[in-house]
Amino acid sequence: MANQISSSNVRVVLRVRPFLPSELNPPSDQKTSQIPCVSILDQHSSGEVTVRLKDQFSSRNECYKLDSFFGQEGRVGNIFEQEVSVLIPGLFQGINATVFAYGATGSGKTYTMQGTESEPGLIPLAMSAIFSMCENTKYSVQISYYEVYLDRCYDLLEPKAKEVMALDDKDGKVQLKGLFWASVKSVADFSQIYTTGLQRRKVAHTGLNDVSSRSHAVLSVVVSDGSSKGKLNLIDLAGNEDNRRTQNEGIRMQESAKINESLFALSNVISALNNRRPYIPYRESKLTRILQDSLGGASRALMVACLNPMSYQEAIHTVSLAARSRQITNHVGSATKQETPKTKVDMEAKLRAWLESKGKTRSIQRLDGLLSPIRQAKTPSSVSSVKAQGPLRSSLKKN
């Protein structure tokens, strides 16, 4: 359950967005299925869930054990009430926290974080809760808003989105030199400033999205009474991309490469934190380096992995990276002759193969370094198999 968030752990929950109108009424020449590729398989007494990802057009499916599941019928407000609201009181005790939406392009990340006027997302809901707790107290609220684009930081609250340098201070902590902090006293005050920053964020057309985010946008909120200071990072990550589908070229290809590299680096940090490894690779990317004070230690973190219910392959990629710290059951149906039943798959080997197919040699080297004997006492458990017949029941155990 949400109150079980512990130090140095990153809680991972899934949100499956509803079908879009274009998916409910596709062109007649397009093969489609209105059956979502993801469903909940088992609810555990610990509050964890086992979810099943199933290819709508074959018998292949895989199961993953995660912290919580929010299906298509759920509202973003449910995620806030169950997962994010528990983080807010800690800010007033000086405990940092990070909430980020992770997933492929078009999976509903921006909607999850921003929402709409009629259904607010996690950002406006969090700000409303913070201001409510500040009433009749000495606490003040300041915000900064910046993006990480091509591994550089740009201040979105400045008219020209100037570059901000990430430098180590005398204590070894990363500081964003020159980053503007705005004092806000109400939700209306915040909305006005935040909306202005949103308009400066870098977006572009790709083969999958007309307004695809090309950067990771980080909203930092500091709550302070002079002696105690807590920081909440609310992050709308850029979507991981398959350039074969997005048809990216030129600068779009460079952006995509940097996005994927930084998301992989973030996945490495989460895996290391959740597996209690002695070495946490914060410096693999600008994003994880900046967030070091809010990932690990006494801080708390929540990943909302967003899934497109139509795309099995995207879902597999998103969840396999998000859940690398856990054992995973792989099930291959026996109905398809071309597939081998009861195969055992090592998720790290599977990830390495995917990186090799993309030609990402640097990322492979980083993965090898992260999993070296010095940095990891034991290798991840291999994936277990389950039978094709009868209901799938999870006997997975958290590492």
Image: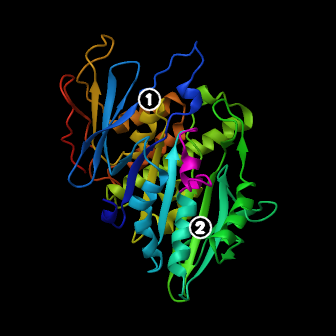
Which residue lies at the image location 49% right of the left edge and 40% below the top edge? 17
In the rendered image, is residue 304 in sight?
Answer: yes
Instruction: Say whether residue 347 is left or right of residue 283.
Output: left
Instruction: Say whether residue 95 is left or right of residue 394.
Output: right
Find the magenta span and give its range. 105-121
In the rendered image, is residue 172 in sight?
Answer: no
Percent of width and height locating residue 79: 43, 55
Q: Which residue is mark 1?
A: 312
Quarter of the view holding residue 251: top right
Q: Which residue is mark 2?
A: 220
Our reading of the magenta stretch's main secondary structure is: loop
Percent of width and height locating residue 278: 35, 61
Quarter of the view holding residue 136: bottom right
Question: Circle 2 — which element?
Answer: strand
In this picture, is 174 found above or below 379?
below
Q: Is residue 116 magenta?
A: yes
